[in-house]
Amino acid sequence: MQRHLQPDGTDQPALSYFRRNAGRKGIDAFFFKLPDFQDFLKEWTRSGTLQPQIANKLAEWLDAGLQEWDISAMHPILVLRYPTNGKYFYVWLDAPIGYPASFKNLCERRSDLDFDYYWKKTQPPRVYHFIGKDIINFHALFWPSMLTCADFRTPSAVFAHGFVTVDGKKMSKSRGTFIMAKTYLEHLNPEYLRYYFASKLNAEVEDLDLNLSDFMARVNSDLVGKLVNIASRCAGFHHQRRWQTQRNVG
């Protein structure tokens, strides 16, 4: 997890993608006053809501002192337009709002659901987030601050997991380690993969490796082997019981 680069953080700024130097340009921007939530976040991140490794990592941000968060974007790439000024919201301001917004949309179409019951403070329902470790700062610093500011409940717990790798390597099309879900479904049962991932998940923040040899061995041993063994044992018990019943009747 890296800190945002400040405008004066490098002597020779460059755009590696375009292979040219970057220039400085002044623009009007909106900022979220994240430092106002410093004390709240120090307490919230140590309340048991986060895994210890994540809380320790976020403490680096908090101990260094939070900066105001630039919530502006210059181009409409997966973002919403501001009500005025022709600007756009930064995607990570907009994206988490989709959680309660989509649920509110559902509540408006169903009479048995009350949005405030689930998202207002002090209500009994619990809200859990499951996210990747690379976006923890957005979900465990920015998002709780936004919710608190809007008088909504914060997540009951945020669980962060590592990346999915294939045979110990990052997914890559060029290396042949990128597997599309559609391709997988054309050949194998999805229950196999669900079981394999579930058997390897834990409370730690570590990458989840899809080792194809281990995947095949574990599916054959745990699923196929054990299920067949259970069926075989049940068949044996059934045969023995039936034979004893027939003998008693005879």
Image: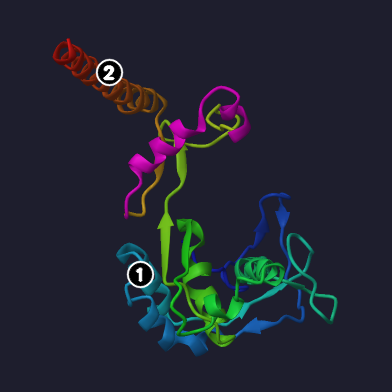
Q: Residue furthest front?
A: 250
Residue drawn at x 42%, y 53% as measured from the top left: 161
Residue 142 visible to the viewer: no
Q: Amino acid at mark 1?
A: Ala
Residues rendered magenta in the picture: 181-203
Is residue 195 depicted above or below 143 in this figure?
above
114 vs 93, nearest the viewer: 114
- Badge 1: residue crowd in 10 Å (few <14, some 14–19, many ≥20): some
Residue drawn at x 51%, y 28% as measured from the top left: 189
What type of secondary structure mainly makes up the magenta span? helix
Q: Is residue 73 magenta?
A: no
Image location (x, y in percent) of residue 41: 42, 81
Image location (x, y in percent) of residue 78: 73, 60
Q: Looking at the image, do the residues carrying marks 1 and 2 touch, with CB atoms under 8 Å apart? A: no
Image location (x, y in percent) of residue 31: 65, 82
To which residue does mark 2 refer? Answer: 235
To which residue does mark 1 refer? Answer: 55
Is residue 108 depicted above or below 234 in this figure?
below
